[in-house]
Image (spheres, grey):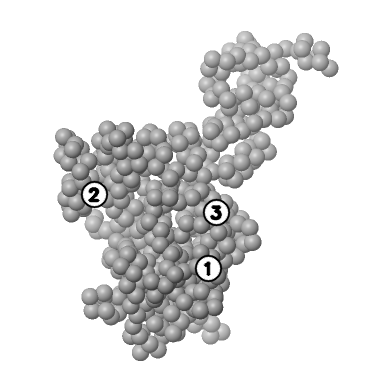
Amino acid sequence: MANNVENCEKVLIINRKRKYRVPKKQLLSVPYFEKMFSSDCVESQENKVKLDFDERVFDSIISWILSGQFNIRMEYAISFYEAADYLMINERFLEPCLSHFLENFTIENIPVLLPQVTKVSKFFTSGVINNICRHFLMITNTDIFLNYPVETVEAILKLDLMVHSEYQIFESIMKWVYEDVESRKELLPRLLACVRWAFMDHDDICKIKNNELIKALPNFDEIISSNGECAFDRSDQSFFLTIHQKADATLLIKILNSDFICLSIGDFTQDDSISLEFVNEDHVSDILFDSGTKGIRIDWIKKTFRWLDFKGKVKTYYSNLIKFLVEFSDNLNYLCCYLEDADKDIPETIFPEEELLLESNGVFILIGKTKCEKQWFGLFPVAKHSWFNDFRDQKHSFHATVLDNTVYILTKDLEFIQYDYETQCFEKNDELKEEKFKFNDLILISHKKNDEVILVNKASGKVYVFCSDEEKWIEKFRIMNINLCTDSSGSDIDKLVAFTSTFLPMQFIEPLYYESSEDSILTTD
């Protein structure tokens, strides 16, 4: 048998600087080579093939062809998949590559993965970019980000990152520079060129000019006049989203801009074959609602959805998220305290009766009640993995949201609480008790772009905005035909399930109609 292999016809493969002599018979098991050698092409006549793959990748592929075994590492996972796809190797070979990638992808891998991403890449490259863009603010709050090479930071900053303002891009640059200011301050102009200055608020630019490192730059005015890459306003990706459940279990999804102008996206059908892996394509969004206790994964192109898992025993949305982020930075200012009695010592181990995880400006804040004393407590921000890994959906006696440094809480008894975790000021009022609302009909959210805290009554469709100056709620508008129309059986149709604020990839969302106003975010290109 060994003699037969040694004596069989061989093909010379030249891949970059490496040469391989491979038995032709075994090489024909690969569709690309089988097709090549069944034709009259030059390669077939000369038994000589020239290729241009990463050497480590092609070594693994040759190993698989000859022995049925191969090695794969995250450093070249995307390039490996692309090479296998080019050679038309079947899905049975590619599936373990995909599984390995999905199981091991974290922000630690970004420096080696980003250089492999190209416009023609197929292997989850849009998923890599999508996760970086969506979770950029969280990534910047990790020590891993602070230790990225400048090439990686620059590549990230050039993406269409999901931020509330360009000032947050500037803040991320300064975080990275200050980690090693003496060696990195010379790189500041290079990174500042990635800021899209045309979309920077004038007041923010004035604030930036007062920074000592910026003052030391001789050419800062030239940098901001260059405008960076201004084709897309990264700060214009935050929207309101409503989900209405129809009588046939399909969902009607609508999007509202910051002025509450509504755009209907259409009906979406449930598809439980949608992967729940944390990495997803750029036309797929994870939308959290009900104070972060529920969520939905939406495929905007296929118009399908799947409910996210918040009850699993092993993997949930939050456990996958913290695995991706690895850990938050040690440089963050951490505070763990009782909300009503900041001076009282809080034990190192807390036994909560219930808790909520709230995303805020790139970190998570935890608000809960202790099991025995029923005291309000908070973690600003959350550091330990166990809070993410152990979080499970359950019935809650309060809703909560965060805006800037203030946590807003609405209790089952309709007490409205405001807690500023910088000043540790705790306030509450009973105004909402006079409205006779039902707790389970209410949704409490915040919207950073509008700087507003919003209360939605699902039963009436009324939407209220909290006026902090006057300490009262003002009715903003009403969503009509919510729980008002019924079918012949008397059951509700088009029931409002969710009203939330979120980042959305509008370039992949096809509305049922367009507006003609050039100023509207809902227009065609």
Indicate the amino acid at tag 3: Asn
Q: How many numbered marks appear?
A: 3
In three-dimensional space, the C-alpha distance between marks 2 and 3, rounded to whole angstroms, equals 33 Å
Residue 307 visible from this viewpoint:
no
Residue ID for mark 2: 199
Residue 142 location (% of width, % of height): 43, 48
Q: Residues within 10 Å of mark 2 (few under 14, many from 20)?
A: some
Q: Residue 119 is drawn in which quadrant?
A: top left
Indicate the amino acid at tag 2: Phe
Query: Residue at horizontal 47%, vertical 77%?
Result: 375
Residue ID for mark 3: 320
User: Would you place residue 43 above or below residue 107 in this image?
Assistant: above
Horizontally, residue 475 falls left or right of residue 248, namely left
Q: Residues within 10 Å of mark 3 (few under 14, many from 20)?
A: many
Residue 167 location (% of width, % of height): 27, 50
Residue ID for mark 1: 350
Residue 132 location (% of width, % of height): 43, 46
